């Protein structure tokens, strides 16, 4: 499929950028001109060719660079990857899900050969060629979840289901939007969503939990979530707030287009076969506003959405310091024309 992996950084000199093709496939999250809170869950089914929804696990031009950045985060802070002892079966479930999905979707880059429990995994972009026994942790160089998620874009948490609730009992989280696995591990669904404003009162999480407790094997679901980030920084964790928090004070009317990035998470959930746990994948996509406004529809719509945000959400998403400059900058691209239905560009 002609994937060319870029050499780029998400820290220090921030050389990250999107190619024109990557801009066109960006998962723009707004399907209307005003912001509205919703669960917005839909079946995680095959999408249009070339879109981020084409395959269950999306691999794109940023793959190698993102895996390098993940290794840097884990080297500095090993607690970004944690798993409680009872989650080992779910870890192996995740190995199977990710290896089979990546090998089926991108055979030129990944190969999985299985002979009973004897598995052979080849990852050509990262130069990995390993044979191991499925279910035997001693045959892998790392614990199963860490081994495979060091080779897959996006964060992953494994949710154990018990007591009519979901518990975040394992995960690897290095590209998060200001939340902490080390803080949330062992919490239940309502506890880790506790800080979100307005949604609890609207019953959003009650409905979402009821839905997810009945998630069926083989019928994954997905949703898009969003926030904004200054500079193309993947790791905006609470642990490193001292490194990125002050970035918010550097936005001016002149540099909005290059500094401010729309940060979209493609969140997908699968029921796992052996453990009955749920894997929650959170794939982060970044786009600077000067790239986003190359789509006139997206430029108009984002301006209107940001103008209509409730104050509570502006504060919760950390936009307070640069929200006025961003809305003013985007207003130059809003000619008042109607926007077409759907989230894709015109």
Image (spheres, helix red, strand yellow):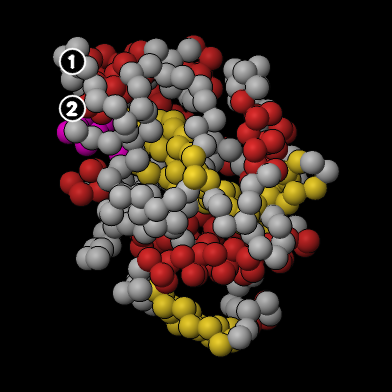
Q: Residue at x 52, y 25 (%)?
A: 38
SS assignment at label 2: helix
Q: Residue at x 83, y 43 (%)?
A: 163
Rounded to the nearest angstrom, the CA distance separating label 2 from label 1 is 10 Å
Q: Residue at x 69, y 55 (%)?
A: 277
The residue pinned by badge 2 equals 296
Circles 2 and 1, Cβ within 8 Å, touching? The answer is yes
- Quadrant position of residue 340: top left
Q: Is residue 290 magenta?
A: yes
- Residue 320 seen anywhere in this rendered image of the structure: no
Q: Where the C terminus falls, by quadrant? A: top left
Residues shaded magenta: 287-296
Q: Is residue 183 magenta?
A: no
In the figure, 72 relative to 159: above or below?
below
Q: Residues within 10 Å of mark 2 (few under 14, many from 20)?
A: some
Q: Where the N terminus falls, by quadrant? A: bottom left
Instruction: Indicate which disc, 2 or 1, sits on the residue closer to the N terminus.
Output: 2
The residue pinned by badge 1 equals 337
Q: Could you tell whether 269 is left or right of 67 in the image?
A: right
The percent position of residue 316, horizontal first and vertical second, equals 53, 22
């Amino acid at each position: 499929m002609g994937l060319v992996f870029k050499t780029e950084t998400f820290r220090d000199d921030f050389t990250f950028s999107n190619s024109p093709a990557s801009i066109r496939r960006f998962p723009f999250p707004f399907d209307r001109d005003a912001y509205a809170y919703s669960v917005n869950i839909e079946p995680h089914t095959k999408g249009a060719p070339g879109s981020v929804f084409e395959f269950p696990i999306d691999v794109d031009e940023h793959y190698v660079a993102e895996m390098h950045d993940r290794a840097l985060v884990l080297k500095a802070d090993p607690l970004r990857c944690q798993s409680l002892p009872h989650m080992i079966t779910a870890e192996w479930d995740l190995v199977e899900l990710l290896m089979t999905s990546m090998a089926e979707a991108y055979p030129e880059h990944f190969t999985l050969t299985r002979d009973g429990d004897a598995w052979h995994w080849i990852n050509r972009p990262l130069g990995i060629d390993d044979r191991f026994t499925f279910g035997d942790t001693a045959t892998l160089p790392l614990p199963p979840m860490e081994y495979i998620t060091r080779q897959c874009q996006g964060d992953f948490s494994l949710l154990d289901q018990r007591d009519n609730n979901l518990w975040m009992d394992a995960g690897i989280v290095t590209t998060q939007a200001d939340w902490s696995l080390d803080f949330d591990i062992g919490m239940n669904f309502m506890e880790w969503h506790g800080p979100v404003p307005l949604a609890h009162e609207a019953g959003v999480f009650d409905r979402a939990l009821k839905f997810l407790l009945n998630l069926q094997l083989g019928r994954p679901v997905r949703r898009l979530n969003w926030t904004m980030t200054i500079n193309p920084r993947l790791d905006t964790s609470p642990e490193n707030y001292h490194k990125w928090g002050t970035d918010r004070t550097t936005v001016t009317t002149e540099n909005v287009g290059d500094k401010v990035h729309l940060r979209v998470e493609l969140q997908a959930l699968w029921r796992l076969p052996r453990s009955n746990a749920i894997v929650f994948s959170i794939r982060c996509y970044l786009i600077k506003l000067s790239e986003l406004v190359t789509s006139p529809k997206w430029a108009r719509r984002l301006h209107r959405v940001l103008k209509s945000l409730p104050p509570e959400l502006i504060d919760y998403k950390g936009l307070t310091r640069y929200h006025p400059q961003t809305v003013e900058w985007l207003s130059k691209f809003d000619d008042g024309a109607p926007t077409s239905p759907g989230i894709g560009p015109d």
